[in-house]
Amino acid sequence: MEILVGALLIALVVIIYAWYVVLIRRRNRALEALSSIDVQLRKRHDLLPNILKLAQRFMTHERDLLSKVVELRNEARQPYDPGSSDAVHRHLAAEGGLQAGLRQLFALAENYPELRSSQAVLEAQQSFAMVEGHISAARRFYNSAVTELNNAVQIFPGSFIAKQVGVQPLPFFEIEDEAVRQPIDANEFLGAR
Amino acid sequence: MDEYDSFYQTSILPELRRLEKQRRRTVQNIIMLGALAIAGGLAAIFHGPLSAVTGWDESHLFVAAAASGFAAAALIFHLRSRMRREIKWALVAPTCRFLGLDYSLDGKGFPLERFKKARILPHHDVATLQDRIRGKQDDIDFELCEASLKRRVERTDGKGQTRSELRTLFQGLLLIYSFPKAFRGRTLVVPDKTWLGNRLAGLGLGERVRLEDLHFEKLYEVFSNDQVEARYLLTPVFMERLTALADRLGTRRGLSFAFADRDLLIAFNSGATHFEGGSLFRPLERPERAKALMQELTLIHDLIDHLDLTNRTGI
């Protein structure tokens, strides 16, 4: 009888440990994916000053929108704690806001033929299209990793173990605005290939 | 197509007409040699009773019958290959030239090593390459070759005798297209082989990439050394294009893809030969030959359009 109880206890410890390992692995995976998003977003942030400079030259009547994009960029660049679900949520929401602002900017650029035909703008939009493609890919990787993490964290007994070791579910990187769901294709807006 | 018709009439048909006489002679010779090969084979099998009837030495009779059978078979093979080569030079080569494609009969210089390195081909001992075609459409460079890959297998019969034979593992096309997106890593898309098969086949191929497209996931397994880049290359739209391509080509397990060194490598195991220019036993002047060949060659351009490889927006 004692042997049986002992064996059951050992089996229980092994199961709990295995679950713990899965939780930590999935959390690390999600954090790795979050970090890969940040790498790609940084590329977008680095491209923005150049694009804004070009836009300022031609889009003189859109100063409010340009200021708004700068503000959104500054907001999105704020440091955050990747371990905190709320902080990650705020960070991703700020990036979503920046993406929406940029989409609006490119939509308005349609009205400025000089901007559309500038060589510098054409080059900038090519780089931008590539960066947006990478951001979209990083977002898909992150959401896939978050799905696996959240399943492990929210389903019993994972929920119990996660609480004990302080592993939290992470928010998805979603784009709320339907129009913003598509990756920004600068070529489409600026009418060139 | 009208332009090709006129090119066919003026540049291809006269040569095919000239070859037609040679084809008839070759077919006659093949039939005669075929009869000789069968007779030799039968004589070798029934050398005992034949020796009793004719009174010839049994072992001499066997050797003579078997040798004549083999010689006839070898001659048939030689004549058939020579005639096929002639037909290809008369039909396939000028048609490729007309389409602006660079054609060579053998596969010399085709980078088979790239496919091996990408690990989208089965392990093989013998590789035969032919019909190397190169060209460019818009900014997309492409190159393809027909490949037959065989593995040597040992087989033991009921008497315990072991024989070595070649088993065909891959028969189809190897295609290389320059890919419009820049990438650094390596991503492979191989046919799904069930849970255990995927784990065994995936050893050393990189990390498994789980994608959102359920239909695509059912058909293929993706491995990559860069999770983000794999998704950058395999966008939802591109995954749909790949599955639609598999449907169009009528193969679910015969397509493998590799993104390597800025190119898209495609291994299409069709199980059929390509760019043959039709049967040896039918008249060469039949226009169906040229039509069938054109259809095969248009597939190369169709693939570019179907996969939308010229689209530089990255979607």
Image (cartoon, helix red, strand yellow):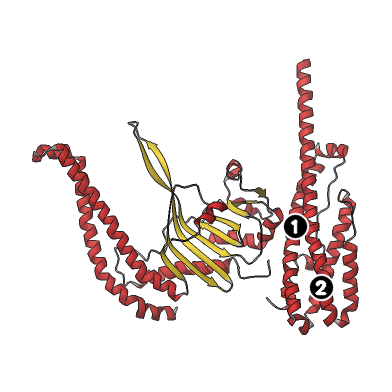
Amino acid tagged 2: Asn
* Residue at mark 1: A138
* Residue at mark 2: A50
Q: Can residue B104 be seen in this view?
A: yes
Q: How crowded is mark 2: few (under 14 residues within 10 Å), some or many (20 or more)?
A: some
Q: In this view, does A161 lie to the left or right of A123?
A: right
Circles 2, 1 touching at the beta carbon (< 8 Å): no
In what element is the residue under mark 2?
A: helix
In what element is the residue under mark 1?
A: helix
Q: Which chain carries label 2?
A: A
Q: Where is residue A191 in the image (x, y as percent from the top left)?
A: 71, 78
Q: Which of B4 and B131 is in front in this view?
A: B131
**Which of the two discs, 2 and 1, labels the residue nearer the N terminus?**
2
Amino acid tagged 1: Ala
Q: How far apart are marks 2 and 1 (CA)?
A: 23 Å
The quadrant of the rendering that contains the C terminus of chain B is bottom right
The quadrant of the rendering that contains the N terminus of chain B is bottom left
Q: Which of marks 2 and 1 is in front?
A: 2
